[in-house]
Image (cartoon, helix red, strand yellow):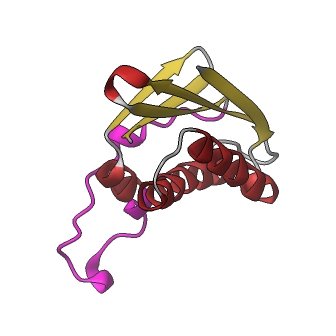
Amino acid sequence: MDDSKKFQASLTELSQMISWIHSKLEQYKVDKKKSNRIELALEEALVNVISYAYSKDAGPLEIRVAYFEENRILEFTILDQGKAFNPLEYKELDISSDLEHRAPGGLGIYFLKQISHELTYLRQGNSNILSIKHQI
């Protein structure tokens, strides 16, 4: 089953995005602990898109969800038409250094990589397509 919802990439719509994601996690009966982790990871990814993809005004953002029953994978895909940005190419965060000596940024991407089963990024035409898979 495949499902999607369109939003404006704006912080004012973030709670609606998370509510929609939460409803999908309930639909697929994801346990509470995994559901919380998935929501947090997706919120990080969405905030990055909202904050950096578009220069001034909010642009379109679409969230898709697909469930692969054979291996119990739930895949969320975030599509936007903002600036090209591949989070998988972002320099690996050194979490062993002190906070005072650590460069700002990158913690959300690090977190996303740690709790996701698989991440893929594709730039297709003028679209960023970030797919986040979770084993449920």
Residue at the spot 37% in from the left edge and 31% down from the top edge: 72
Identify the magenta region.
Answer: 82-108
Where is residue 119 drawn, in percent x and y? 37, 36
Image quarter hosting the C terminus: top left
Residue at the spot 60% in from the left edge and 49% down from the top edge: 46
Where is residue 29 drawn, in percent x and y? 52, 44
Residue at the spot 47% in from the left edge and 52% down from the top edge: 38
Name the quadrant containing residue 98. Answer: bottom left
Residue placed most toward the observer, 5 or 109: 5
Image quarter hosting the N terminus: top right
Name the quadrant containing residue 11. Answer: bottom right
Where is residue 16 drawn, in percent x and y? 77, 52
Where is residue 10 drawn, in percent x and y? 77, 51
Report the label total. 0
Residue placed most toward the observer, 104 or 38: 38
Q: Is residue 134 visible?
A: yes
Whether 87 is drawn above or below 34: the answer is: above
Residue placed most toward the observer, 117 or 8: 117
